[in-house]
Structures are given as C-alpha cells and as structure tokens.
Amino acid sequence: MRILSATLTNFRNLAETTLDFSPHVNLLLGRNGEGKTNLLEALNWFALGRSHRGAKADELIAFGQDALHVALSVEEDSGAIVACEFGLDRSGGRRLRLDGEPLKGKADLIGRLVTVVFNPDSIGLVRGAPQQRRQFVDQGMAELDAAYLAHLGACQRVLKQKTGLLHDLRRGFGGGGRGREELTAWNRELAYHAAGVCRGRAAYAQLLEPHLRAGHEAMAGPVGTVDFDYRPRLESVMKHLVSGGGKLPPEDELAGAIFAEFDYITDSEMRRGRPLSGPQFDDFGITLEGVDLRTYGSQGQTRTAAIAMILGRSDVLFGQRRMRPVLFFDDIFSELDRARTRRLQEMSSRDHQVFIASARPDDITGWRPEGLRAWRVESGRFAAVEGDAITAGD
Amino acid sequence: MERPHGGNGLSGGDGGEFQSPALERLVRSLSRLPGLGRKSATRVALHLLTGGGAEAHADELTAALGDARRQVRTCSQCGSITEPDPCRICTSERRDRSQLCVVASPVDVLPMEKAGFFRGRYFVLGGLLSPLDGVRAGDLPFERLLDRLQDGPVTELIIALDASVEGETTALYIQRLLSGNPLQLTRLATGIPVGGALAYTDEVTLQRAFQFRRAF
C-alpha cells in the first residue's frame, strides 16, 4: 500500500501543510530535531492507533493548540483509494474516520494501513528483551488473522484476572474455600486462549523463517543459515512443538494439554501469589549457524538480522494477503556499511513505498531510484529539493 | 494555567467546586451514577434546579425514587427485579419448571421475555466472576443455585452469559460445580446474527459460527 498524500494540522512542530508523496521513495533530509521523525510519526499513527514513539496526545498536539488533525490518502494494494483521518484533542477525545465513516476501536484499524518502522531501536528485536520479539510476532500474526488478535486480547485479560485472584488468595481472601475451583475455571479459560496464541506464534515462526533467510542472504551474502524458532515457556507446548516438527496440534487438544500443565503448577502459583508460566513468558530464538544472535551476535550481525526480520514480515504479509506495508527508515543508514545500505535501499524500494529520514545526504549518494522525491526539513517546514541539490548538504 | 469556566456564576472558579455545598453534594452524588461524569452530573443537577418546570420535575423524581426504593426488591428465588416476591415468572403455573436459564443481570431477562420464546424460568447471578472488580465465587449465589437444582424438577440448565472472558469463566465454573450432576447443561450458540450479512460479520464470530456449524 502507499500513502499518496498527507494533510497535517497542528501536529507537533510541523507547519500546516499538504504533502504529495512519491509512490516509491521519499527522502526527508535535515538536521536532528527539525521534524523528520515527527512526520514519520504522523504518517504511522493511523496504522497503530497510537504514536510509535509512545507519545501521548498532549505531546503530539502543537504547542498552544487544542487539537490536531491528520488526513491521509492511502492507496490499498487492490488499487482502492481510501481517506484515513484522525483527530486528537487535549481532553482525551479521539476521532478516527475511514472514508468519512467513524471507526469504533483499534481492532477496526488493523490492516487498513500497514506500516513498518525501522529505527536505531529496532536492533532490540534481536538484542532486546523477549517482549520486543513477542510484540513483533504478535503484530505480524494479527495482520494475518483477526482471530489471533482476539485470542491475544482475551489471554491478556484472563491473565490479569488470574493474577488478581492469586494475589487475593495469597493475602488470605480465600472466598469460602472455593479459591482453588475458581482458579481452575480461570485456568481453563486461559488455556483455551493460550492455545490460540501459541498456535499462532508457532505458525508465524514457520512462515517467517524462509523469508528471513532469503532476506538475510541477500543483505549479507552466503554467511550461513539463520534459524528463527519459537521458544514457548509452557512445557506442554514445547513438547508438542518438538514432536510435531514445529507444528502444534488443533486448538482443543493443545488447550487440554496446557490446562493440565496449569493445573499441575497451581499449588506453586498459589504459594507464590503470581502466574509462573504461560505465553507471557514466550521467546523466539534467532541463530546464525547455531550461534545465538540474541547474546553472541556482533553489532553488524544483529543489525542485519533485525532488518531481515522486518523485511521478512513484509514478505509474509505479501505471501498471505497480497499486501505490502509502507516502510519507514528513520536514521538507520549511518549504522550500516555502504554496501549493505545500498542493498537494503534497493531491496526495499523494489516492492514498497519507502520513507527515509536522514541527517546525512551522502547516505544516498549515487542512488537515484525511480520516482524519488525529496524534501529538506527545517523547523517543521518542508521544502522540495531536486537533482543535485539533494546531496548538496547544508 | 488558565481554564475556561461555564458562565453560570455558581462556580467558585478556583478549585472547580461549587460555592453551594448542597449543590456540590448533589453533583457528587449524581456523578457516582454509572455513565455520568462530573460534567454530565453538573448538567443534570442544574437542570433539576434551574431548568424550565424544574420544581415539578425534581419533586416527581424524588417521589419516584422513594417509591421505587420502597417497592422494588429482588426475587428471593430467581434474583430478578420485582415488586411481589417471589416474582410473577417464578410463581407462574404456565412456565416450564424443567428448564432453568442462568443469566448475569436482571437486564438480561428483558430481551428474552420480550421475544417470548423461552417458557422456562430464570436464575440471575447478579454478576460475573471478576477478581479485578472484587467479584469472587463467594460473592455470587452459586450455593443458592445448587439448592435450587437439588430439590427442583429442573432437567436442563441453560447458560446464557456474556461471550466475554468473564462470562466464559463463570460458565466453566458452573460446569465444574455441576460435574457429576445428571442434569443437562447447555449453552447459547454463537454465530451470525439473523439478517446479518456474512461479509460484515467479524472474523472471530465467523470462526465460531464455522466451528459450531451443524448438519443441514
């Protein structure tokens, strides 16, 4: 999909403006702090229903203003053009519209505008806490299967309830000696949704791996095989995963096995007053020739693996749903060598609309992709630049 | 920081509270009602005190509230809201005594009665299991439900609870409570709404409808 144009009003420091984008490569040049990332944040907000930098409405609304408004014209992969709008105000109000029709919740947003942001923090996909890898897989799977998103939401909700109950029980609120039975009921409900989540994660790891390998090889050359595998915390799931060669049994069967495991550890959970296992502790392994990149990868290896994961996610989405996300590269080329930078630029711009924010014009020296558009960003204002002026610097 | 104020002159202006303690008490009391924030509570309060025909309306409201408080009670058998106790459904000779339908709230009885197809009787739980809201098994009338099933002619217990995780868990708890009991336990089906277009059914509902498809 492609963002054809954007009209911004009162978004951070950005001047009120309408920008028409290239369906291929869009380049935003300027020193740090001038507004490049703010534009990426505005374009990306509609895809997530929130700021990818975790900013609240108060931070997004321009200083001295009460509300912001952003309207995007998005061309879907089917060729249909939809108008996506959002407005936020300081009292917490938010309005989302698709072709003028109000959208109710976040779930309605999924798949409308799919974007992937790549910035210096993305290396955390490989190096960071398991939560970052879970989020990556959860988002990727939710784009493919709405039922997965429902299981994930239900799982989180039941887990909160179960945690509350265990906390109660530990503090002595036994509820007339029925605490154990209550826990059993919550565990059964949790097992049902956990089975859906674990199945989705296992399926996604299998979908991603071949694309991840191909992308990795295209970037880094034939340096070895990358494996991406699901590492569930639940032993019952791990056992089935091993015996099934990476595939998990049908939901009901898996839910039964997960429930048995929950039931087995219930006494320990009641003693400790918190859940001790479940999909909330899952992780994913990323290895190169058997070496765990999460702990032993060099800076360059982890960065290449993280990029391959992100491009792999795009390929999975395209393979399953014929959709291509819009890619945002925010200040990442400074950390890659020139050869990898060029390969990444060429690979990504072949199939995607790409937005590149860069403080260093020489990142793109000698690269003139089809339909390139460039802007110089200064104090929130955008000035189109062309030809040699792009790399002229400032 | 400068904040805009309503120009009704009743506001103290600095702390966001009314200068009249009686009005302030009324607003606070109203804002404890479900769905009313302080803003809406203030609108309601000002309407009752200063709107057109305010005095008559306020008196009528006071009287209605008093009568309702005196006359409305929960049925000691099913937990529905009623004036006579037991309620008319529980005492009716025309209702099928072999079917008992478990619902979460008295409000859930209304659409079923309006549709009129169900001829059995009800049992209102008054809530769903939800430790986060402080609702535990001991807070819901499960013992009374068991008593009711013990000495009654009920042969089928129909669980009609929300399709939320709290509703599902409460259903699972009841199922376990009744393990070993010979009565038939059933649940409402989930699926495509009547008159609904397949293309606009959400994926999860569609998946359930598929999962529980039946021979045709």
Image: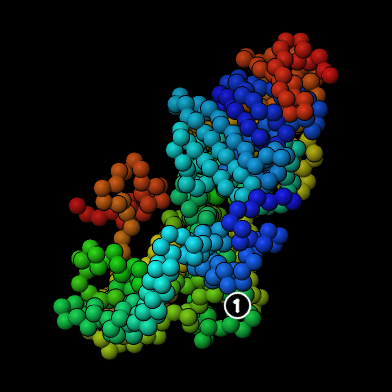
At label 1, which amino acid type do we have?
Asp
Measuring from the top left, give residue A254's x and y in whole percent: 47, 60
Quarter of the rendering containing residue B114: bottom left
Q: Is residue B76 visible?
A: yes
What residue did someone put label 1 on? A168
Measuring from the top left, give residue B125's x and y in whole percent: 39, 76
> Could you tell whether A131 is left or right of B100 in the image?
right
Q: Is residue A258 visible?
A: no
Reply above or below: A360 against A297. above
Task: Name the residue nearer the viewer: A166 or B24.
Answer: B24
Reply above or below: A383 against B58. above
Q: How many marks?
A: 1
Reply above or below: A97 against B86. above
Quarter of the rendering containing residue A211: top right
- The residue sitting at the left extreme is B94
Secondary structure under tag 1 reads helix
Measuring from the top left, give residue A180's x and y in whole percent: 52, 79
Assign the C terminus of chain A to one quadrant of the image: top right
Question: Which residue is depicted at the point 41% across and 63% down?
Answer: B53
Task: Name the residue nearer the viewer: A369 or A237.
Answer: A369
